[in-house]
Image (cartoon, helix red, strand yellow):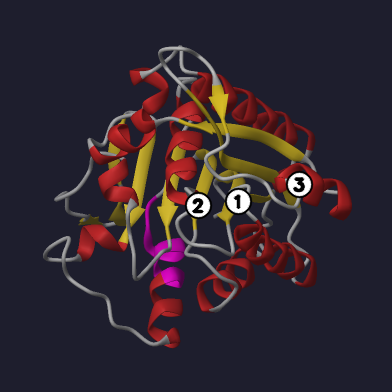
Amino acid sequence: MSTVKHKILVLSGKGGVGKSTFSAHLAHGLASDESKEVAVLDIDICGPSIPRIMGLEGEQVHQSGSGWSPVYVEDNLSVMSIGFLLGSPDDAVIWRGPKKNGMIKQFLRDVDWGGLDYLIVDTPPGTSDEHLSIVQYLSAAQIDGAVIITTPQEVSLQDVRKEITFCRKVNLPIIGVVENMSIFICPKCKKSSEIFPPTTGGAEKMCQELNIPLLGKVPLDPQIGKSCDEGKSFLTECPDSPATVAYRNIIQSVKEYCSSHKVSDK
């Protein structure tokens, strides 16, 4: 991990809020600068969706003298996931905590990442084994921080508050919060509507209460799901979408945070 300049965790207490989708598009956005080397590590052991979202389903990991070689999407964008080690996308990983922890340690220790500018770690929902393991294993290498994903409704925000508490207890810096599916903008009439009304003020109010940056709000766009199913980058498929504009602003904020927090140089 000493060859990785910036390490960013993508967290959420709630499943289904678009965490893997954000991880993939954060990686695509960072890798659009061809001078930067970017990788995604998928530690969602039981539900690895990154291979499908990144268009790598069915790919295999190869072993070399220097360790496992990650699978490449582009020359400067690579991925590692347990999904590459399964015989079929339908195979279930039925493991207890210690075996999951061992797999995460192996991903960090045995993968030949090379010199990376950014490593994006996509995590499962919750605050349990995988989260404790990745924070513990990366503590010596130092993590830049976590991006926390939510949706506007209170049932999601409740779990995200738990995630924020987790970050504070383990001394994991919080880069900021992203509110996914904030509004829906009709592609024809351009009017906006709230599919998931923020009954308690949404991520914006929560961030104000907890003194955490709100990185941005990503509108709901059906093309995001379609791009993920097809393994394509939504940012390049729909460059003029309001959601793409929101993504790019958030990615710029993450880059600025990392450049001002050069933890690996300490």
User: Which residue is depicted at the point 48% across and 61% down?
Assistant: 15
Q: Are marks 3 and 2 in contact (CB under 8 Å)?
A: no
Residue 182 shows in the view: yes
Residue 66 shows in the view: no
Residue bearing mark 2: 17
Q: Is residue 62 left or right of residue 122?
A: left
Q: Earlier in the sequence, mark 3 or mark 2?
A: 2
Q: Earlier in the sequence, mark 2 or mark 1?
A: 2
User: Which residue is depicted at the point 36% across and 41% down?
Assistant: 78
Going by the numbered disc 3, the residue's amino acid type is Gly
Classed neighbour count for the residue bearing mark 2: other residues with Cα under 10 Å, few (<14), some (14–19), many (≥20) = some
Residue bearing mark 1: 150
Nearer-the-camera pick, 209 or 167: 209
Q: Is residue 81 left or right of residue 239?
A: left
Q: Tag 3, which secondary structure? A: loop
Classed neighbour count for the residue bearing mark 3: other residues with Cα under 10 Å, few (<14), some (14–19), many (≥20) = few
Q: Are marks 2 and 1 in contact (CB under 8 Å)?
A: yes
User: Which residue is depicted at the point 66% across and 30% down?
Assistant: 255
How far is mark 3 from mark 1, CA to CA? 13 Å
Going by the numbered disc 2, the residue's amino acid type is Val
Point out the stretch of residues depicted in magenta: 104-112
- Tag on residue 201? 3
- Tag on residue 203? none
Q: Main secondary structure of the magenta part?
A: helix
Q: Is residue 75 left or right of residue 185?
A: left
How far is mark 2 from mark 1, CA to CA? 6 Å
Going by the numbered disc 1, the residue's amino acid type is Thr
